[in-house]
Image (cartoon, rainbow, N blue to C red):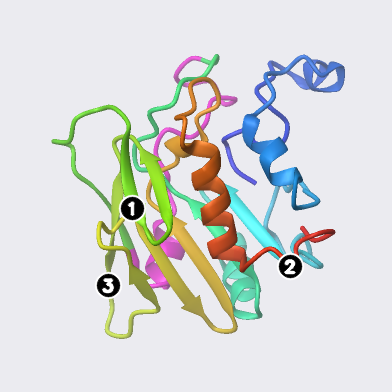
Amino acid sequence: MGTIPLYWGEAGGFDQLLAGEGATHWARGELEADYRLLPLDTLEDGSLAGVDYLLLAQPRPLSPSENVALDAWVRQGGKLLLFVDPLLAGESRFALGDRRRPQGAALLSPILGHWGLELQFDDTQDAGFTLASAGSAEIPVNLSGSLALIGDEPLCVLSDNAIVADCTIGAGRAVIVADADLLDLHEPHPAAATALHRLVEHAFGGTGDRAGNR
């Protein structure tokens, strides 16, 4: 789920989706090598039933009930990989203001704050891809955000560059990346596919139990 069109591709309308005329996103094929994908429009109660793993790619602002449902799902053992970018730099065929364009700035403060995180942005940084290390992953980032711990009892551990947070929330886990340009559709960085696989494996845990899961 997200405004970056990982599943459906970048299409001008439903007729193009049905005709397969949209620009297919490279990440869908990478993910489908190991997972059965299920697109979601909402995170309301019931939509996450039977879902083991959840990838949110620059999602729209969540409703209060969706925040509650997402938090409950993670605490009950769900595993989440969340890309949340304060200033998305990737290209789109759709103009600024078009609802089909990926969300330019992530607006997820309620759920991040509930998990003891704050998304920050340094507006003095230069545009252009760089590689940010986080564990075994070298993540292509462009005008990235950073994550800060807030609250007295942190649930998360930050990477040295504060771009990735690894959070233990109840019985579940959330890995949060403060940049989404790794998922650029039109001009992906050469290291994007490898970085996506590393982050997915880190968030969802190994490769042995993935076939047939969502």
The residue nearer to you, when weighing 164 against 86, is 164
Q: What residue is disc 3 on?
A: 150
Q: Are marks 3 and 2 in contact (CB under 8 Å)?
A: no
The residue nearer to you, when weighing 195 against 111, is 195
Q: CA distance from mark 2 to mark 1?
A: 25 Å
Amino acid type shown at disc 2: Gly
* Residue 135 appears in the rendering: yes
Q: Earlier in the sequence, mark 3 or mark 1?
A: 1
Q: Residue 195: percent from the left, percent from the top? A: 49, 46
Magenta span main SS: loop
Q: Secondary structure at mark 1?
A: strand
Boundaries of the magenta span = 95-117
- The picture quadrant where one finds residue 67 is bottom right
Q: Residue at 65% of width from left, 46% of height from top? A: 1
Q: Are marks 2 and 1 in contact (CB under 8 Å)?
A: no
Residue 53 part of the magenta-drawn span: no
Q: Is residue 125 above or below residue 168?
A: above
Task: Name the mark nearer the viewer: 3 or 1.
Answer: 1
Q: Residue 189: percent from the left, percent from the top? A: 45, 30
Task: Name the mark nearer the viewer: 3 or 2.
Answer: 2
Q: Earlier in the sequence, mark 2 or mark 1?
A: 1
